[in-house]
Image (spheres, rainbow, N blue to C red):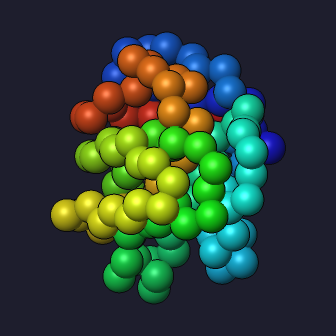
Amino acid sequence: MKKGIYNKTTKENININLKYADTYFKRLKGLMFKKNIDYGLVFIIKAKNRFNSGIHTSFMKFNIDVYFLDENLKIFDIQTLKPWEKYTPLKKADYIIEFEENKIKNKLKKGDEIEFI
């Protein structure tokens, strides 16, 4: 588990634990059935699986903020989703990060480039 995100654009450290969904089963389960979280969940989308960057919030119990990033860890889309919604960005994502809604409000925005620390 990493301890945060460095926003290279604003030169700000965001101290939050990160967990990684870097296998098929971790991505499949995601945040389903959780009551709340105190971390961000990072989805690593391997090149062969990039055909679908869409996500869903089936079986989730809280709203989430979702950040879609390209291969350079630059944020190109941000969405807030309620339970039982789905969303697919116009561009394919290499990374997706999910946080409980408002957990890092105003610390990341479209166009920001980040680094996991």
Question: Residue 66: image x %, image y %?
Answer: 44, 46
Considering only vertical position in the picture, is 78 above or below 30?
above
The residue at the far right in this view is 1
Q: As drawn, is 49 to the left or to the right of 41?
A: left
Question: Residue 91: image x %, image y %?
Answer: 23, 64
| Of the pair 115 and 107, the residue shown nearer to us | 107
**Quadrant (top left, top right, bottom left, bottom right) of the C terminus:** top right
Q: Is residue 8 visible?
A: no
**x 73%, y 32%: residue:** 38
Q: As drawn, is 42 to the left or to the right of 33?
A: left
**Quadrant (top left, top right, bottom left, bottom right) of the N terminus:** top right
Considering only vertical position in the picture, is 63 above or below 86?
above
**x 34%, y 44%: residue:** 79
Count of marks, rendered view: 0
Q: As drawn, is 63 to the left or to the right of 78?
A: right
Q: Is residue 14 visible?
A: yes
Q: Quadrant of residue 20?
A: bottom right
